């Protein structure tokens, strides 16, 4: 069922997929209460930890449900940008997608709080919060009524840093006049502006060519994405601003989720929890491996004046804490610090 809708959406997007008649036939009509194929859209490459963890999720789900439930992953942004695929998840033409918190912030501004500078104090802290269903239930179910989407949990995006075509960024002063790509997110515009640069909203897939053609002077992201996208080849100077520990949320069409029988749902939830833990493990390993790859290829990773950046970034967090409800959430989350 899911794939029929996928095919019409794909046709509308003009995307060419290598689905064989057999693939499609195999999935048609298979999404009953007893099983089906979930189509998952991801904008990362196959070497990215999210892909590897999700591939493992698909294998385990298939095994544990005796082949009743499968996940088919479309990586590399084949089905479109996150902006495209979140809409496809809303209308059910894809079942699942990985969405940056900065994208979900456009559907519900409450997501912005969790992406504020210094909101999470470490990846360990972040993951203990993201896997706490009681703490996160309100946020995770907040899109069900408006968008028909449920959040299952999330993956770390690690620490995000600035990277540029020119070297020498150690204080916010050095960023004056620099045009940096940001995600299409009011929060990221605030963060990059606070660091003194000029934010240019673009989608992830547009960054490489925009740097290459000189439209922007750089961007900000984590080390893993910096390397898997090849951005380090065109902007080889990463400055370790650590201005955000970002979150990628796993989003599923609520009807697709509810189409599982209670027994299958229990398996699905347990395997998903394991996927979050696996992703974190891969993330920590890959951050170091990717850094070594980039270093060997001529990229540099420079320390910055941390206090100078903190002074500019704290007010972004504080502005998000002016709302008493947000402050209450923040305080509860700080209690989860390891
Ligand atoms: C990271 C994150 C993605 C996001 C991307 C971006 O790679 O994992 O979800 O889309 O950053 O900067 O757009």
Image (spheres, rainbow, N blue to C red):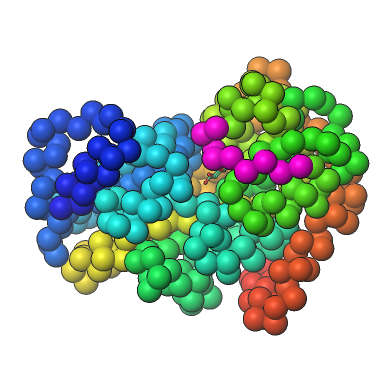
Residue 100: x and y, percent?
52, 52
Residue 337: x and y, percent?
67, 67
In the depicted view, which residue is nearer to us: 105 or 275? Answer: 105
In the depicted view, which residue is nearer to us: 297 or 213? Answer: 213
Residue 179: x and y, percent?
74, 36
Q: From what the image shows, is residue 83 above or below residue 224?
A: below
- Asked if residue 121 can be seen in this view, the reply is no
Q: Quadrant of residue 298?
A: top right
Q: From what the image shows, is residue 139 above or below residue 290?
A: below
Relative to residue 167, is residue 272 drawn left or right?
Answer: left
* Ligand 1 quadrant in view: top right
Q: Quadrant of residue 9?
A: top left
**Extreme-top residue of the structure:** 297
In the depicted view, which residue is nearer to us: 303 or 38? Answer: 38
In the depicted view, which residue is nearer to us: 194 or 66? Answer: 194
Residue 330: x and y, percent?
67, 73
Residue found at x 27% / y 51%: 93
Relative to residue 303, is residue 183 drawn left or right?
Answer: left
Residue found at x 40% / y 70%: 146
Q: From what the image shows, is residue 272 above or below residue 303?
A: below
Membership of 201 in magenta stretch: yes
In the rendered view of the protein, which quadrant contains the C terminus?
bottom right
Residue found at x 40% / y 58%: 251
Residue found at x 22% / y 43%: 8
Q: Which residue range is magenta in the image? A: 198-206
How many numbered dots are placed on residues in this image?
A: 0
């Amino acid at each position: 069922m899911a794939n029929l809708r996928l095919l019409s959406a794909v046709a509308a997007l003009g995307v060419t997929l290598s689905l064989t008649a057999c693939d499609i036939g195999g999935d048609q009509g298979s999404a009953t209460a007893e099983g089906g194929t979930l189509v998952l859209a991801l904008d990362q490459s196959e070497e990215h930890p999210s892909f590897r963890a999700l591939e493992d999720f698909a294998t385990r789900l298939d095994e544990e449900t005796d082949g009743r439930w499968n996940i088919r992953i479309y990586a590399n942004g084949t089905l479109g940008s996150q902006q495209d695929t979140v809409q496809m998840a809303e209308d059910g033409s894809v079942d699942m997608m990985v969405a940056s918190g900065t994208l979900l912030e456009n559907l519900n501004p409450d997501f912005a709080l969790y992406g504020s500078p210094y909101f999470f104090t470490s990846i360990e802290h972040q993951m203990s919060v993201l896997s706490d269903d009681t703490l996160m239930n309100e946020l995770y179910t907040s899109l069900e009524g408006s968008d028909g989407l449920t959040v299952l949990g999330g993956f770390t995006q690690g620490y995000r840093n600035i990277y540029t075509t020119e070297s020498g960024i150690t204080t916010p002063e050095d960023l004056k006049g620099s045009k940096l790509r940001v995600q299409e997110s009011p929060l990221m515009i605030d963060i990059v502006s606070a660091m003194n640069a000029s934010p240019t909203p673009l989608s992830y897939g547009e960054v490489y060519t925009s740097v290459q053609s000189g439209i922007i002077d750089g961007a900000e992201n984590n080390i893993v994405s910096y390397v898997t996208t090849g951005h380090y080849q065109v902007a080889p100077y990463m400055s370790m601003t650590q201005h955000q520990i970002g979150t990628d949320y796993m989003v599923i069409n609520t009807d697709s989720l509810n189409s599982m029988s209670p027994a299958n749902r229990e398996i699905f939830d347990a395997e998903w929890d394991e996927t979050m833990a696996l992703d974190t493990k891969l993330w920590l390993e890959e951050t170091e491996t990717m850094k070594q790859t980039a270093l060997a290829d001529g990229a540099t990773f420079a320390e910055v004046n941390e206090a100078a950046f903190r002074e500019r970034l704290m007010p972004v967090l504080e502005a998000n804490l002016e709302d008493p409800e947000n402050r209450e959430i923040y305080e509860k989350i700080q209690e989860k610090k390891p």
